[in-house]
Structure formats: structure tokens, C-alpha cells
């Protein structure tokens, strides 16, 4: 066996998914004995067989990647419980193995994957989905790019055909539960955090429980980075529709139409909502000039 063959053999065996009880599998997918494979290139010692020695590396690899995902989804972990969460992550990683040089991307497909795996969410599937989407939005907001925003003078030349981009770090979420409260509660329990939310000012009196009780409530969030901290800002539905339309590449006129389509708003109401949305977004530097593709 050459060095390259040994490296490939070890890599394949170490990265082979664990069994459902978090042990090294005794056979490969094609029916070969894992013990026999290990004996082919790993020496036993007076305490451990070849299989046992390989299993240490196999399990440690998977415990490390499970931990990496758990670090990005602490609230989902808290709500589901560590045992179920670990099973969820193991199942997720079997279908979505690491394909990047960085652990940062491990959880990128988890919200989408979880959509079709309600067996892990104990009847709270919508809640779990909202938590997963918000926690991944935090990751994206934390390290996606920030580009120079438009300035006040730029707005004077805008018309209905103007196309605006939004900051790459800005994430827009349409949620069924106020999970920003729950995520913040988890972060308070687990230590200092650099996430903040204007939900604090809206919070009603709650119990002293570590996790606030969740009741269904339509929540629209803008998750963004400002001065190297991530903020969760609650916005109204019209602002979400307007910003989402701009984010999709539509013109300013089309975005304004999308924001109020189907609603019974007076001209005064529309004007007030538009002014509020643009004032907040401009102040936070969310708007950028769209670049031609």
C-alpha cells in the first residue's frame, strides 16, 4: 500500500458514518467487514484491537462535525434536546457530508433538509423550522460581505425604474413564531452573545423559565450586521415584501407595488409605511446600487 493509498483508505474509514447508536459500523455498505479492513493497515496493541483503534478516530471525527453543527444551532438543540438533536445531525450529515474546506458550511443545508424530516421535531415542526432558519440566517449575516451603501444624495435621482440591491449580509425571514425571543433566551443561558433584537422593547412579561413559551404569531425579521454585531430587527409585512422584491432584482416601482398588493391601504398609509421602511433601511445602510450582470 502506497502512502497515497493509505491516506485514502484512512480517510474513507474515518469519515464513514456512524451507526444509529454512535458506534463504528461493523460492515461497509457493500458488506465488507470493517474489522478486517482495519486489520489490513492498523496494528493492534495489548489493550485495543485494530477495529477499536480505528473506531476512536471514526467516532472523534463525527463527534467533531456534530459539535460544529450544534454550535451554529444552539436554540434548536435546546428545544429538541441533545439526544434527539444529535440523532438529527447524524442523519443530516449522512445525506449532506462535508464538502467544503471549512466547518462553517456544514449546516448550510440543514433548514432545507429539516423541512422533510418532521420525525425529529416532536409535533413542533413549524417551530423547529423557524428556529433553524433564524439560526442559519445569523451565520449568514455574521460573515457575508458588506458593500458601500447608497448615500442621501443618491436617493434624489431614484425613480420607478431604479434597481437597488440589498447588503449581502441582510437576511429576510417570514416566521410563524417569535423565535427571536427564544434564540436570545438560549444565548443568555449559554454565555455572552453579539446578537441583539428590537424584540426586547416589545417583550411582554414572561415566566422565569429558561425558554419562553412560544405561541403562533406572524413575525417578519430582518437579520443584519452592524458594527460587527448581528441584530434581529422586527419589521412589518409590507417592509418584508418591499425588501424581498428588491432583493429579487425587481425595480423600485415593482417592489412598491408588491408591498401593497391586495391590501386596503389609503395613500396616506402607504406613504407613511414607505417612509418608515426607507428611513430605517437607509439609516442602517441596507441599500446599495445594483450592479449590472
Image (spheres, rainbow, N blue to C red):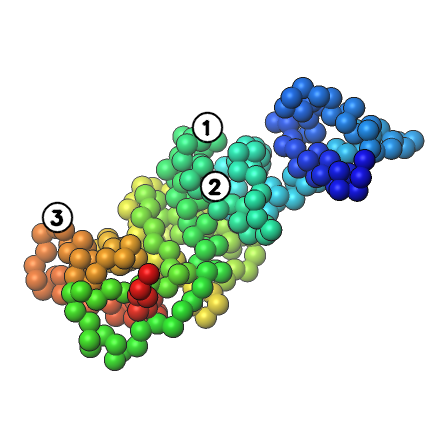
Point out residue 237 in the picture as x, y percentages from the top left corner: 24, 53
Q: Do the residues bearing badges 1 and 2 touch, measured as CB atoms within 8 Å?
A: no
Q: Which mark is residue 262?
A: 3
Image depth: mark 3 or mark 1 in front: 3
Q: Is residue 272 visible?
A: no
The alpha-carbon separation of the residues under discs 3 and 1 comes to 37 Å
Q: Is residue 153 above or below residue 170?
A: below
**Which labelled disc corresponds to residue 265?**
none
Q: Residue furthest top?
A: 31
Closest to the observer, 143 or 238: 143
Determine whether the residue tagged by mark 3 lies in a helix, strand or loop: loop
Q: Nearer the viewer, mark 1 or mark 2?
A: 2
* N-terminal-most mark, 3 or 2: 2
Quarter of the image where the C terminus is located: bottom left
Residue 241, how many percent across, how many down?
24, 54
User: Which residue is the site of mark 2?
Assistant: 110
For image coordinates 66% across by 37% down, the residue present is 15
Residue that badge 1 annotates:
119
Residue 246 visible in this rendered orientation of the protein: yes
Amino acid at each position: 500500500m502506497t502512502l497515497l493509498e493509505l491516506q485514502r483508505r484512512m480517510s474513507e474509514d474515518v469519515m464513514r458514518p456512524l451507526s444509529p447508536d454512535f458506534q463504528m459500523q461493523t460492515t461497509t455498505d457493500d458488506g465488507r467487514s470493517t474489522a478486517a479492513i482495519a486489520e489490513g493497515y492498523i496494528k493492534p496493541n495489548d489493550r485495543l484491537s485494530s477495529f477499536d483503534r480505528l473506531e476512536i478516530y471514526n467516532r472523534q471525527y463525527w463527534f467533531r462535525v456534530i459539535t460544529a453543527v450544534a454550535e451554529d444551532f444552539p436554540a434548536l438543540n435546546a428545544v429538541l434536546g441533545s439526544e434527539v438533536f444529535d440523532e438529527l445531525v447524524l442523519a443530516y450529515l449522512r445525506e449532506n457530508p462535508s464538502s467544503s474546506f471549512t466547518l462553517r458550511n456544514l449546516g448550510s443545508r440543514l433548514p432545507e433538509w429539516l423541512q422533510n424530516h418532521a420525525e425529529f421535531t416532536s409535533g413542533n415542526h413549524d417551530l423547529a423550522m423557524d428556529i433553524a432558519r433564524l439560526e442559519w440566517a445569523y451565520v449568514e449575516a455574521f460573515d457575508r460581505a458588506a458593500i458601500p451603501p447608497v448615500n442621501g444624495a443618491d436617493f434624489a435621482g431614484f425613480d420607478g425604474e431604479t434597481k437597488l440591491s440589498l447588503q449581502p449580509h441582510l437576511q429576510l425571514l417570514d416566521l410563524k413564531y417569535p423565535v427571536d425571543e427564544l434564540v436570545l433566551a438560549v444565548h443568555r443561558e449559554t454565555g455572552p452573545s453579539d446578537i441583539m433584537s428590537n424584540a426586547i422593547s416589545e417583550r411582554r412579561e414572561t415566566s422565569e423559565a429558561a425558554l419562553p413559551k412560544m405561541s403562533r404569531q406572524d413575525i417578519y425579521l430582518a437579520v443584519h450586521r452592524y458594527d460587527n454585531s448581528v441584530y434581529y430587527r422586527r419589521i412589518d409585512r409590507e417592509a418584508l415584501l418591499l425588501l424581498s422584491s428588491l432583493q429579487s432584482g425587481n425595480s423600485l416601482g415593482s417592489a412598491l407595488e408588491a408591498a401593497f398588493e391586495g391590501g386596503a391601504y389609503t395613500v396616506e398609509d402607504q406613504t407613511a409605511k414607505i417612509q418608515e421602511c426607507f428611513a430605517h433601511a437607509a439609516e442602517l445602510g441596507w441599500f446599495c446600487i445594483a450592479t449590472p450582470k
